[in-house]
Amino acid sequence: MTGREILHMMKVKAGFGTPDTGNGKGKISKHITHGFHLMKGKSAHPMEDYLVSEFKQEKDRELGLFAIFDGHLGHDVASYLQNHLFQNILQQHDFWTETESAVKKAYVETDEKILEQELVLGRGGSTAVTAILIDGQKLVVANVGDSRAIICENGKARQLSVDHEPSKEKKSIERRGGFVSNIPGDVPRVDGQLAVARAFGDRSLKMHLSSEPDVIVQEVDQHTEFLILASDGIWKVMSNEEAVESIRQIKDAQAAAKQLIEEAVCKKSKDDISCIVVRFQ
């Protein structure tokens, strides 16, 4: 076991790691509940997924903060995002007036801070999908990478995030001087290495990667049933429709998140998996 792995285990035992499962609900929006679950995959390295799932009061407003951070080449960048990304978003002076641009700016600024701390955080990286629920009425979803946000409305699945696949962003990667490999039997990769076109960190590939998120603002109304945030360990083996259908009748958000992960494992997913479910009804 490496020194970094020992340090990670010490952090978890000391309470600095993410618990495996949990739930909660809003104080103002009492009808909105959330639950989360994580499961270590079959890889030899330590768990690299981190998440945020909580409600907090901010300037007389209630914010639901939900995020999945899927690390690669180490867990340190994902752990940093868990502790700092929402803080950086809410510190943007125009968050309440120009929320979409504030989120985009905070993503890019956070990535710059990660790169500045390479000696501490290492050369790895992380994808991210974040959702900010404002007063139970407005949902702001942003992402870089392939963790995904799905909303269920009237029983139908709709994807709110964008899968940043190298094949879809080949031209922009090549404009930055990179290339996209397409080896038979493997997924497309940036410079033959990374299977996503956007990510935090990844110093060695950063000239060819973007950390600018796609952002969507979604109103929550009487047709909105629930939101799913999950790492790609689920989406590699399940479609959006399958995920929605598998938990639509489960009213407990924590049980729903656990069910999604267990179903992905049954479908032979071997990756680390993290999942959040937010129920509006």
Image (cartoon, rainbow, N blue to C red):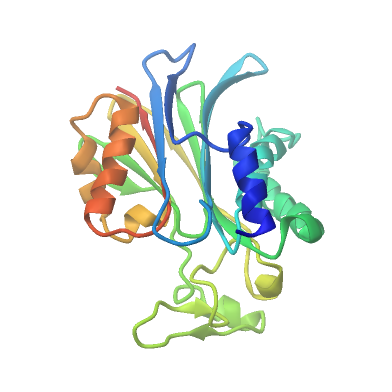
| Viewer can see residue 77 | no
- For the N terminus, give its image quadrant: bottom right
* Res. 173 image quadrant: bottom right
Residue 192, placed above or below residue 139 = below
* Res. 120 image quadrant: bottom right
Left or right: residue 33 versus residue 98 is left
Please tell me which residue is depicted at 70% across the width and 49% down the height of the picture.
105
Please tell me which residue is depicted at 23% across the width and 37% down the height of the picture.
247
Left or right: residue 199 versus residue 122 is left
* Res. 61 image quadrant: top right
The foreground one among 16 and 276 is 16
The foreground one among 200 and 13 is 13
Residue 170, placed above or below residue 99 = below
Residue 93, placed above or below residue 137 = below
| Viewer can see residue 116 | yes
- For the C terminus, give its image quadrant: top left
Please tell me which residue is depicted at 31% across the width and 45% down the height of the picture.
261
Residue 122 horizontal/vertical position (percent): 72, 61
Residue 144 horizontal/vertical position (percent): 54, 56
Please tell me which residue is depicted at 29% across the width and 30% down the height of the picture.
255
